[in-house]
Image (cartoon, helix red, strand yellow):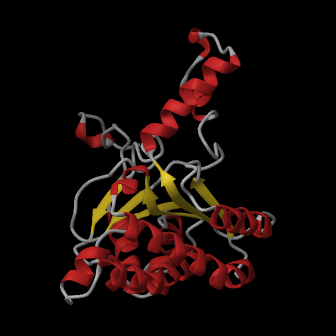
């Protein structure tokens, strides 16, 4: 599956236009499998994290070129703080190096960068400043929005939104889904259309729980460090072949004829 086929569809005319419309607006990736990638090569887990850098940039470029408007990457969860301190320290140093190294490229590509989470005081202040600097640098960009979930937990975001509603004094009867979503972090973020999780694991793992409520799920067996643009584009193609009903049915499935 080529990039052109994903973006334009394989047919011409109306079918090609439908192919363009079929590109998911918001794709979220659970980047899983770094440790297993390293273990299969008798390498330390840190080698898997280091190898993941190439995949991150490849997927960002593929998503932008394919016309994805929002890309969210799950980099570090609230549960990941339970990992060994040496691994956490390595991740913090690695992420800082990656952010500083690729900031010029992301900005040049017109990508707006944001970081979801980043509230735990254990995050090194220099890394938090780099996150803030990249956010400020790219704030005016109008290309794809890249959200990196770092120190993120979907349940924590929902609890925080509930607390915000209470502090704001919103009457209980006035709370609906739209009102609640407005109190989540980055409330302008659209619902996720497609979740891709690598390594074959089939879990959401507390990732953007509110936003993925009706997302299509694809569980790729490929470990994240081996995941490349062709794998990503094949996931987009799989998404295009699915029919999203949002709880409804086709008109001809309930005894009615199609108009």
Up-down: is 66 above or below 85? below
Up-down: is 98 above or below 24? below
Q: Is residue 223 visible?
A: yes
Q: Is residue 123 left or right of residue 230?
A: right
Residue closer to the observer: 88 or 116: 88
Residue closer to the observer: 84 or 179: 84
Residue 14 x %, y %: 51, 70
Image quarter hosting the C terminus: top left
Residue 141 x %, y %: 77, 69
Residue at image position (47%, 38%) is: 156
Residue at image position (38%, 41%) is: 246
Residue 229 x %, y %: 43, 84
Q: Is residue 200 left or right of residue 183?
A: left
Name of the residue lying farthest toward the front: 86
Residue closer to the observer: 84 or 8: 84
Q: Is residue 25 visible?
A: no
Q: Is residue 159 left or right of residue 259?
A: right
Residue at image position (25%, 71%) is: 199
Q: Quadrant of residue 162?
A: top right
Residue 21 x %, y %: 53, 64
Up-down: is 248 above or below 170? below
């Amino acid at each position: 599956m080529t990039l052109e086929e994903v973006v334009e569809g394989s047919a011409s005319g109306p079918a090609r236009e439908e192919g363009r419309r079929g590109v998911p607006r918001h794709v979220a990736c659970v980047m899983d499998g770094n440790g297993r990638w390293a273990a299969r090569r008798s390498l330390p887990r840190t080698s898997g994290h280091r190898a993941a850098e190439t995949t991150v940039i490849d997927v960002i470029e593929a998503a932008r070129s394919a016309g994805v408007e929002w890309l969210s990457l799950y980099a570090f969860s609230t549960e990941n703080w339970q990992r060994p301190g040496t691994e956490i320290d390595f991740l913090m140093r690695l992420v800082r190096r990656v952010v500083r190294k690729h900031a010029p490229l992301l900005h040049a590509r017109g990508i707006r960068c944001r970081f979801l989470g980043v509230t735990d005081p254990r995050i090194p202040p220099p890394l938090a400043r780099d996150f803030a600097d990249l956010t400020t640098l790219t704030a005016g960009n109008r290309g794809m929005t890249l959200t990196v979930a770092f120190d993120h937990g979907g349940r924590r975001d929902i609890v925080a939104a509930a607390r915000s509603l209470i502090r704001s004094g919103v009457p209980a009867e006035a709370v609906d889904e739209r009102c609640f979503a407005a109190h989540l972090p980055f409330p302008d973020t659209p619902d996720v259309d497609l979740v891709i999780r690598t390594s074959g694991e089939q879990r959401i793992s507390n990732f953007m729980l509110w936003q993925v409520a009706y997302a299509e799920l694809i569980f790729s067996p490929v470990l994240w460090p081996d995941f490349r643009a062709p794998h990503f584009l094949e996931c987009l193609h799989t998404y295009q072949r699915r029919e999203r009903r949002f709880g409804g049915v086709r008109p001809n499935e309930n005894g009615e004829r199609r108009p």
